[in-house]
Amino acid sequence: MSLMRKRTRYSFLLMLALMSALVVALVLRKAAPPEVARLLPESDAIVYANLKPLRAATHFDRSPVNRTPEYQQFIDATGIVPERDLDSVAFALHRMDDPNGPNGPVGYSEVFEGRFDGERLAHYLASIATAKESYADHDIFTIRVGDESVTRPLRITQLGYDTIAASNMPTAEQIHSILDRHRAAASPFSGSSLLSARYRDVPAFSSAWGIGHIGLPFSERGAISIFGLQLPMSEDTTFVASLRYLGTLHLRLEQIAPNDADAARATETLTSLLTLMKTVEQAQAQMQPHPATDAAFRELTDSTKIEQHKDRAVLTANIPLELVKQFASPNPDLQP
């Protein structure tokens, strides 16, 4: 009887230990960065988006799209409709040594997760590729993109039945890195040094986020310029940006300054720019009224707050879904 009790106790303890290990593994996996982001190579910035909640909220996949002939040819050949089939995307932004080169100031490496017909995609890529390489048991197709005067290589490979990677960098280093990370992707905390350093700053349950020098795409003469407005910060400024749906779509943008004094100056300057933006918005609404859009922009600016938290200037705002639906409309000029 005593032996039976001991066996029962050991069995219970073993089951409890296994369940505890499973819970810990699930918690760690949930806290880890998304896999598409962990696969990205070393970079100056990372941008990630989970498109499923955005698609459910805006139904942008149902909007009519005026497609270019090249874009329609890609869809017909592969069966992939990006606005319908993509579930999550992650982009690595790479500063280019020559901002006047084919890539401009920024190069990109991307990982896409969704629903793809691998055979049709491989056949299409093989039909348009100018080169093909085998690396880590995967085929890498190189196609030339750009206009007639300036072209650059775009390397594409299928990582699995639901994942595609691409890079437009001049060499194959970045696409090789993605394949190397895919081969060793068992750890939920693998990834680039930037991801390891900054992902902890991303708020939980964020559907979209960006970390690092995410002003790079808007770089102009060493500064950040958006819609013709030059912001009082350099292109090297480190940001942590996030979007979360908390009843409304909540934006949080943190500028990480070298010290508290710099953060205070950034907060003051951004507050002045917000005041100026509200004034311009009111003037435009009076000159060219668009009631629905004007109301949405007013809701956005009225909810915007700028505060200093030690060495960080923090902007928060609520983004109306009406604006999201407008920005989420498929781009008719998008090409594969």
Image (cartoon, grey):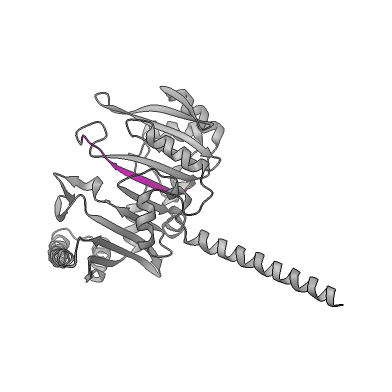
Vertical position of residue 84 compared to residue 246: above or below: above
Q: Which quadrant of the figure has residue 297? A: bottom left
| Magenta-tinted stretch | 87-98
In this rendering, position of residue 326 left or right of residue 235: right
Whether residue 227 is visible to the viewer of this picture, yes or no, is no
Task: Report if residue 96 lies within the magenta region.
Answer: yes
- The x and y percentages for residue 98 are 21, 34
- The x and y percentages for residue 237 are 22, 54
In this rendering, position of residue 96 left or right of residue 51: left
Residue at the location (24% across, 24% down)?
149
- The x and y percentages for residue 18 are 66, 64
Count of numbered labels shown in the rendering: 0
In this rendering, position of residue 260 left or right of residue 103: left
Question: Can you say which quadrant of the picture contains the N terminus?
Answer: bottom right
Question: Can you say which quadrant of the picture contains the C terminus?
Answer: top left
Q: Which SS does the magenta portion mostly show?
A: strand
Residue at the location (32% across, 64% down)?
251
In this rendering, position of residue 60 left or right of residue 43: right
Residue at the location (43% across, 31% down)?
73
Q: Which quadrant of the figure has residue 291? A: bottom left
84 or 114, nearer to the observer = 114
Vertical position of residue 174 compared to residue 6: above or below: above
Vertical position of residue 83 compared to residue 71: above or below: below
32 or 129, nearer to the observer = 32
- The x and y percentages for residue 99 are 20, 36
271 or 180, nearer to the observer = 180
Task: Report if residue 262 lies within the magenta region.
Answer: no
Residue at the location (40% across, 53% down)?
49
Q: Residue furthest right?
A: 1
Whether residue 3 is visible to the viewer of this picture, yes or no, is yes
